[in-house]
Amino acid sequence: MKNDCLDAALAELAVHGIRDVEVARGAKHPQIRFRVNGGPTLHVFALPGTASDWRSPENTRRDLKKLLREAGVNIERERPKPPTRAPSRIELLEQRVAALEALSKPKPEPGEPAINLTHPKENAND
């Protein structure tokens, strides 16, 4: 019979480098017995015989991580960064318009000010 909680616990132990694991199925609830880094302490973790709901494997992972933390195993891993969001069509269009506007502006001659400081009516009579 498949036990999702047992699979989750064994996978979590494997992720953290614990390989020498014994599964005991004597009573109603299976047990996982393991030693951390070959140490003298035998850790025992009881599992549910059947999953009560869809969250049971995640709850098992959480409880096992707590036990590993207490045993001195460093379980903190760098969390993956969320993927960068692609710009929307509107943002892409705004970027293209800004680039075209920058190309269409005349560049000042060397020695001329970058902006026209004269009044527009004064330039109309020229």
Image: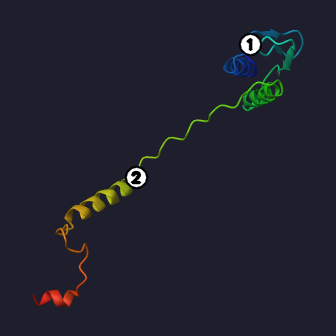
Q: Residues within 10 Å of mark 1 (few under 14, many from 20)?
A: few
What residue sits 16% from the left and 69% below the top?
A: 109
Of badges 1 and 2, the one in the foreground is: 2
> In the rendered structure, which amino acid carries the disc numbered 1?
Met
**Residue at the right extreme, as displayed:** 27
Report, in whole angstroms, how far the alpha carbon at label 1 lies from the one at label 2. 49 Å
Residue 72 x, y percent position in the rendering = 80, 25
Give whichever of 117, 105 is nearer the camera. Answer: 117
Q: Residues within 10 Å of mark 2 (few under 14, many from 20)?
A: few
Q: Any mark on residue 39, and which?
A: none
Residue position marked by numbered label 2 in the rendering:
88
Residue position marked by numbered label 1 in the rendering:
1
Sequence order check, earlier mark of 1 and 2: 1
Circle 1: element type: loop
Give whichever of 70, 28 is nearer the camera. Answer: 70
Residue 70 x, y percent position in the rendering = 83, 27
What residue sits 62% from the left and 34% below the top?
A: 78
Residue 56: quadrant of the picture: top right
Give whichever of 120, 18 is nearer the camera. Answer: 120
Residue 103 x, y percent position in the rendering = 22, 61
Quarter of the image that includes the C terminus: bottom left
Give whichever of 91, 100 is nearer the camera. Answer: 100
What residue sits 25% from the left and 64% below the top?
A: 101
Left/right of residue 20 with respect to residue 44 in the rendered view: left
Left/right of residue 88 with respect to residue 76 in the rendered view: left
Mark 1 and 2 residues: CB-CB less than 8 Å, in contact?
no
Quarter of the image that includes the N terminus: top right
> In the rendered structure, which amino acid carries the disc numbered 2?
Ser
